[in-house]
């Protein structure tokens, strides 16, 4: 069977994204995609490697879009302002694309070269933002992991309806990010104090 005109990996990805964001990640199946694209399921195999291939396509696209969203938010900002910007951008992405975000967490092959590359780009972006606090090496990686865990936890709880008390979630997010920033400042101050003590002792 020859490939259907107009059907390609991009149109399949866009249809899968729409289904994931409106119906949930698990709703993305060969049958639902075929129905959305008005083709027979076998036609999809001309462009993707079955359901696993579609989910891999989604995970890569989701990571690319998340990295793009965070990068755009960081442009022209530094320090506390940059941390707040990328933090809010992260949560906004999950709110706008819940299914696509879930796809980033369920890559069929998490060791796929493209998945690893974009994941590393996101970590590198956060580390660059944290450089304003003079964090480097393992300290920067630990801080980047901490920020990601904080944002993922908040976004995931929100998506699952975990916040039942009727309080403004944006205010909660602001307080949470500010608490993280305050912690980073404390780490930096302690590090500066330790360096100062070491220099003093060395000069004795």
Image (cartoon, rainbow, N blue to C red):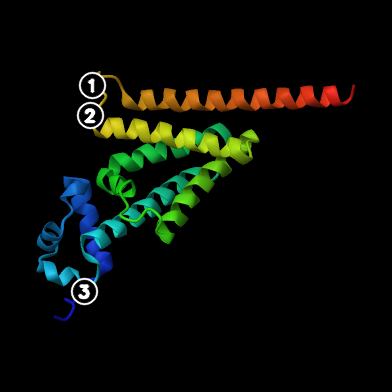
Q: Are marks 2 and 1 in contact (CB under 8 Å)?
A: yes
Are there few (<14), some (14-19), or many (20+) residues within 10 Å of tag 1? Answer: few
Mark 3 lies on residue? 46
Number of labels in the image equals: 3
Image position of 105 with respect to 60: above or below:
above
At label 2, counting other C-alpha atoms closer than 10 Å, the crowd grade (few under 14, some 14-19, many 20 or more) is: few
Secondary element at tag 1: loop
The reply to whether dot 3 and dot 2 touch (C-beta < 8 Å) is no
Q: Is residue 95 left or right of residue 174?
A: left
Q: Is residue 182 above or below residue 159?
A: above
CA distance for labels 3 and 2: 39 Å
Q: Residue at the location (84% across, 22% down)?
A: 201
For residue 82, say whether it is visible. Answer: no
For label 1, the residue is: 164
Gap between marks 3 and 1 measured at Cα: 46 Å
Quadrant including the C terminus: top right
Within the image, what quadrant is residue 45 found in?
bottom left
Q: CA distance from mark 2 to mark 1?
A: 7 Å
Image location of residue 58, percent across then percent down: 29, 56
Measured from the top left, where is residue 138 in percent x and y?
60, 38
87 displayed left or right of 27: right
Whether pointer 3 and pointer 1 mark residues with C-beta atoms closer than 8 Å, the reply is: no
């Amino acid at each position: 069977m020859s490939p259907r005109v107009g059907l390609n990996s991009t149109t399949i990805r866009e249809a899968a994204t729409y289904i994931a964001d409106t119906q949930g990640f698990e709703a993305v199946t060969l049958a639902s995609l075929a129905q959305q694209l008005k083709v027979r399921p076998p036609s999809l195999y001309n462009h993707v490697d079955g359901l696993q291939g579609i989910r891999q396509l989604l995970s890569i696209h989701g990571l690319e879009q998340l990295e793009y969203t965070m990068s755009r938010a960081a442009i022209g900002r530094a320090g506390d302002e940059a941390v707040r910007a990328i933090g809010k951008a992260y949560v906004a992405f999950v709110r706008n694309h819940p299914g696509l975000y879930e796809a980033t967490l369920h890559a069929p092959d998490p060791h796929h070269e493209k998945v690893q590359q974009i994941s590393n780009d996101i970590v590198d972006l956060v580390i660059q933002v944290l450089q304003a606090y003079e964090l480097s090496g393992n300290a920067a990686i630990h801080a980047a992991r901490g920020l990601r865990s904080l944002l993922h936890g908040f976004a995931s709880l929100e998506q699952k309806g975990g916040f039942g008390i009727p309080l403004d979630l944006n205010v909660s997010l602001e307080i949470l990010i500010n608490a993280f920033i305050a912690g980073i400042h404390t780490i930096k101050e302690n590090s500066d104090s330790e360096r100062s003590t070491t220099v003093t002792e060395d000069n004795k």
